[in-house]
Image: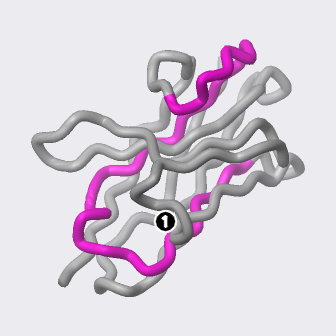
Amino acid sequence: QVQLVESGGELVQAGGSLRLSCAASGHTFSITAMGWFRQAPGKEREFVAAITWFNGPTTYADSVKGRFTISGNNAKNTVYLQMNSLKPEDTAVYYCAADDDGSGFLTTRAIYDYWGQGTRVTVSS
C-alpha cells in the first residue's frame, strides 16, 4: 500500500505561481509512475501531468504545456508540480496519484492505484 498526501494549494492571482507537493509513504519502492490530476466544480477529473518514477519521461496535458512542470525527488518520496502563469481556468482540486505496476498510459486515470485527498488551487482574475 502507498499513502499520498498533497500540499501547497492556495488562492493565487492570475499570472502567479504555485508549487504543489505530494509526499508518498508506505511501499514507495513499488511506485513506477506518479501523476497529477485536477477536478474543477461540475467537471470530470482530468489529467494534468505525469512522470515515470522518479526522473523518467514526463507527459503533460496540452492545456498546461509550457506552464507546468512535474518533477520527482526519490530521496524524499515526493513529486512536485510547479505551476507558472496560472489562469482562472486552472482553478480546481489537484490530486496526486501513483501507479505501482508499470501500466503505462500515464494520462489515463484508471491505471493509477493510489490517490491523495486533494489540495485546492484557486486562481483569481
Q: Is residue 33 above or below residue 82?
A: above
Q: Is residue 43 above or below residue 88?
A: above
* In the image, residue 83 lies in the stretch drawn in magenta: yes
Q: Is residue 79 above or below residue 64?
A: above
Please identify the quadrant where the C terminus is shown: bottom left
Q: Residue at x 89, y 50 (%)?
A: 75
Q: Residue 63: x, y in percent?
A: 40, 57
Q: Residue 53: x, y in percent?
A: 79, 38
Range of the magenta residues? 78-107
Q: Quadrant of residue 14?
A: bottom left
Residue that extends furthest to the right in the rendered view of this protein? 75
From the viewer's perspective, tell me whether residue 38 is left or right of residue 2: left
Question: Identity of the amino acid at label 1?
Answer: Gly
Label 1 sits on residue: 8
Disc 1 secondary structure class: loop
Q: Which of 78 and 17 is in front in this view?
A: 17
Q: Which residue is drawn at 70% across and 42% down?
A: 51
Please identify the quadrant where the N terminus is shown: top right
From the viewer's perspective, tell me whether residue 75 is left or right of residue 58: right
